[in-house]
């Protein structure tokens, strides 16, 4: 049943109104939660030191944040430039949200990564695991309560919309019907022809897609039963192999469920090979936020962690995300505007007319979705 998926209303954080102008980092103290637990010399209780942040940034270590993920490569370059660093290097190890949290915990005695990209639903899981610091950057003041850690340690950064990249050439070659909605994926002709978004037991993208299915089928964040029902029908439609651009190019899958900005990148790659492809926002979907998770165990690099967590919500970072097609969280929530050139390659707004902004994700339990996938989708 879906009761376990939804947190008790007693535990929900109220969505706060966003107001006020942005304030410079130098004018604000960091937002430190649970201050009584911190000693005077706690590294998370003070603003970052610019010189130390610059030195620490010369060797950025991340999980799940490669240069080509939402244009993070450009974000890193802008961050280094803001610190006057000209010789910065970046090393990333790709992982799912759950793997990143597990890795932070496993490496706590000898931390490696400074921060990681997670699906926002996994933020409370990270807090509960104790891998994040009791720290929020000054720029997080602009975020509603549901879009940042209750005790600190993570902030929403940008949103993707669960969508489809469709190989139109493969559809035509195989005599298959057009795809415009989630429901179209259930047609018998598409059995084994759809690339999955990943495993909802560990993947933020897959969990976001699961929630989108709830909204698309008459449910919402308080009623995920429609998503369970739809997911059961989707299982036989998935190709046995993990989705990939290679399978899409060969026509072994004709559609792949990904965030809209990843779909756009795939379309560009296919068009370079003269393959007709398109991004399809399949009717009702959601703006699904990603988040930056700070490694609270990596105390030796706390200055760069604090600095980057603030920078990632800046206009410069938002512009970089937008150029790639990701929706900066400030734009989704309505408090940030971008220059026209930053959004020039976005799909027409008409494509997003049925996409939902979920005001409060805190009543959705990521771990319960994972167990429900096991018990009611795979085992149902």
Image (spheres, rainbow, N blue to C red):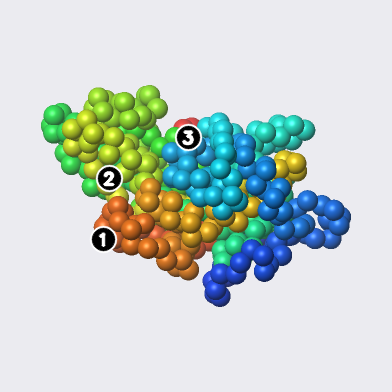
Q: How many labels does the image show?
A: 3
* Circle 3 residue: 199
Dots 3, 2 in contact, CB < 8 A: no
Task: Confirm or deny contact between disc 1 and disc 3 (CB under 8 A).
Answer: no
Local SS, label 2:
strand
219 or 48: nearer the viewer: 48
Q: Closer to the camera, 57 or 279?
A: 57
Mark earlier in primary sequence (2, 1): 2
Relative to 370, 105 lies left or right: right
**In the drawing, what numbered circle is on residue 113?**
none
Q: What element carries label 1?
A: helix
Q: Position of residue 139 (x, y in %)?
A: 60, 62
| Mark 2–mark 1 distance (CA, rounded to whole Å) | 13 Å
| Mark 2 in CB contact with mark 1 (< 8 angstroms) | no
Q: Where is residue 316 in the image (x, y as percent from the top left)?
A: 48, 56
Residue 105 rendering spot, x and y as whole percentages: 70, 36
Residue to which mark 2 is pinned: 279
* Above or below: residue 312 compared with residue 114: below
| Residue under pointer 1 | 350
Circle 1: is it few (<14), some (14-19), or many (20+) Cα within 10 Å? few
Q: In this view, does 103 lie to the left or right of 200?
A: right
Residue at figure coordinates x 56%, y 47% from the top left: 80
Q: In which quarter of the image is residue 250?
A: top left
Q: Does residue 165 sit above or below 246 in this rendering?
A: below
Q: Which of marks 3 and 2 is nearer the N terminus?
A: 3
Q: Which residue is drawn at 13% across and 29% down?
A: 173
Identify the mark nearer the N-term, 1 or 3.
Answer: 3
């Amino acid at each position: 049943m879906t009761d376990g998926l939804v947190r008790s209303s007693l535990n929900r954080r109220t969505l706060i109104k966003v107001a006020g102008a942005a304030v410079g980092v130098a004018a604000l103290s960091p937002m430190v939660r649970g201050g009584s637990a911190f000693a005077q010399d706690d590294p998370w209780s003070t603003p970052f030191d610019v010189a130390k942040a610059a030195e620490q940034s010369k060797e950025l270590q991340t999980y799940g944040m490669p240069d080509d993920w939402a244009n993070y490569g450009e974000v890193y370059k802008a961050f280094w430039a803001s610190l006057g660093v000209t010789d910065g290097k970046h090393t990333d190890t790709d992982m799912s949200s759950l793997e990143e949290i597990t890795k932070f915990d496993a490496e706590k005695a000898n931390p490696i990564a400074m921060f990681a990209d997670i699906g926002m639903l996994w933020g409370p899981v990270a807090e509960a695991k104790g891998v994040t610091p009791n720290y929020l950057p000054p720029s997080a003041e602009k975020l509603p309560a549901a879009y940042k850690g209750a005790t600190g340690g993570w902030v929403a950064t940008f949103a993707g919309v669960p969508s489809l990249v469709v190989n139109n050439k493969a559809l035509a070659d195989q005599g298959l019907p057009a795809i415009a909605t989630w429901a179209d994926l259930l047609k018998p002709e598409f059995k084994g022809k759809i690339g999955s978004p990943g495993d909802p037991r560990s993947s933020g993208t897959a969990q976001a897609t699961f929630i989108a299915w709830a909204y698309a089928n008459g449910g919402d964040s308080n009623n995920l039963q429609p998503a369970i029902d739809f997911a059961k029908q989707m299982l036989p439609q998935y190709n046995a192999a993990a989705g990939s651009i290679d399978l899409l190019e060969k026509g072994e899958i004709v559609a792949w469920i990904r965030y809209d900005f990843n779909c756009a990148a795939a379309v560009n790659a296919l068009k370079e090979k003269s393959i007709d492809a398109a991004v399809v926002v399949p009717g009702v979907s959601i703006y699904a936020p990603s988040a930056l998770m700070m490694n609270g165990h990596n105390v030796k690099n706390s200055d760069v962690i604090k600095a980057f967590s603030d920078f990632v919500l800046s206009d410069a970072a938002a512009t970089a995300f937008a150029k790639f097609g990701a929706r900066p969280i400030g734009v989704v929530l309505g408090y940030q505007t971008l220059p026209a050139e930053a959004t020039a390659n976005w799909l027409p707004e008409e494509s997003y007319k049925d996409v939902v902004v979920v005001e409060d994700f805190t009543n959705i339990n990521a771990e319960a979705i994972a167990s429900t996938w096991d018990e009611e989708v795979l085992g149902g």
